[in-house]
Amino acid sequence: MQVTAPRATSTEVHLPELDLLRATALLAVVFIHAASWVTGGDAPAQQGPYAGAMALARFSVPAFVLASGLALRHAYGRPADAGAFLRRRALRTLAPWLAWVPVYAVMDLIYGKIAPNPHDVVVWLAYGPGHLYFLMLVAQLSLLFPCLPSGRARLAGLAAGALVMQVALGVARTYAPLPTGPLSWPITNLPQIEAPFWVGWFLVGCALAADYERVRALSWLWPVALLVAVLGGLAVLAEATVVPGDPSRQGTAAFLWPSRLPAALAVAVLLLWVGRELAPHAHRLWTVVRALSRRSLGIYVIHVAVIEALAHTALIGLPPPLRLVVLMGGSLLIPYWLTGVLTRTSAGALALGEPGKVRWRPSGAG
């Protein structure tokens, strides 16, 4: 099987500012999962400082989706071989999903989150095995990529239309009465059908990449982006006071709040612009940023398992601030190390979405 090499759409193949966006989003995701052991994953933002910080940190997944679209468009343009592109993306997303679902199923069985019977295991799979839903989401969005228009104006118009649809769905999902009964599954089960709720973020990333030299040239406006990001964060906290407090509108569903769009978009642009300005001058800092970015997918996949293991030990009795520090530190350092160990082999690399380390054999090889 032959994989088409990426085609750069800019004079610079690697974007150091994209490393800052990924690394910061990763830290925010780890914070959310670690802090959930302090205040609860579905706690309303007004419950306390940890819950409020978690609400603000939820810019992370929108930023990851935007970064995915930006990176793909920057690297591939419009793929000449859609089949080869989709096979590569499947290895990047579906292979880790298949590899780690059994791991998290066993852990949830051990910790009593699912009952040891086929029915509950099937329900667990249907509702998405935890944070691994992100891999399924990116796989769904990747199916759109080869079909996107090549022109910048058409792509920008498509992204704008997708954002309008995404916000409308977010408003309905946040405030409208949710259906009940058997037909409620497609609406309330976000992890498996989330693409319509996120496609705007993906297409915005693609649109930014299509005109990225102009976007980069505006990096001197980063103080404006900082101001908008602060105002956006305040808007998120303000909306948190009116969003219904039931778990179906909090937690993962809080990614869909309407105020999330301007807030997360401002943070993403801010990080790209700050990264553009800072990267040439922050050599040692950027070594850490680049390292986190390069292993971000592996850390993302593994870190929840580490948090679960640490949280079920005596650490659960520590004061909340110390507990959070230990959970965050352990769930960054241990997965970072494990990612490095696992990616030394082809099987381990494939399990963490690193198909570049897999030795391809030509089509027809036995």
Image (cartoon, rainbow, N blue to C red):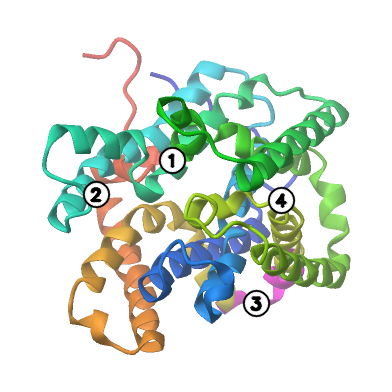
Look at mark 1 in the image and give the residue it sits on. Answer: 135
For marks 1 and 2, give the one nearer the viewer. 2
Look at 38% across and 76% down and name the residue there.
38
For marks 1 and 3, give the one nearer the viewer. 1
Q: Give me the C-alpha separation between circle 4 and circle 2.
A: 31 Å
Q: Give me the C-alpha separation between circle 1 and circle 2.
A: 14 Å
Q: Quadrant of the C terminus?
A: top left
Q: Which amino acid type is marked by label 3?
A: Ala
Q: Quadrant of the N terminus?
A: top left
Look at mark 2 in the image and give the residue it sits on. Answer: 104
The residue tagged with tag 1: helix, strand or loop? helix
Look at mark 4 in the image and give the residue it sits on. Answer: 258
Look at 42% across and 74% down and name the residue there.
39
Structural crowding at the residue carrying mark 3, measured as other residues with C-alpha within 10 Å and reported as few (<14), some (14–19) or many (≥20): few
Look at 41% across and 39% down and name the residue there.
356
Magenta segment boundaries in residue numbering: 276-284
User: Between residues 208 and 63, which one lies in front from this camera angle?
Assistant: 63
Q: Give me the C-alpha separation between circle 3 and circle 4.
A: 35 Å
Q: Give me the C-alpha separation between circle 1 and circle 3.
A: 32 Å
Q: State whether residue 146 is above or below residue 41.
A: above
Look at mark 3 in the image and give the residue it sits on. Answer: 282
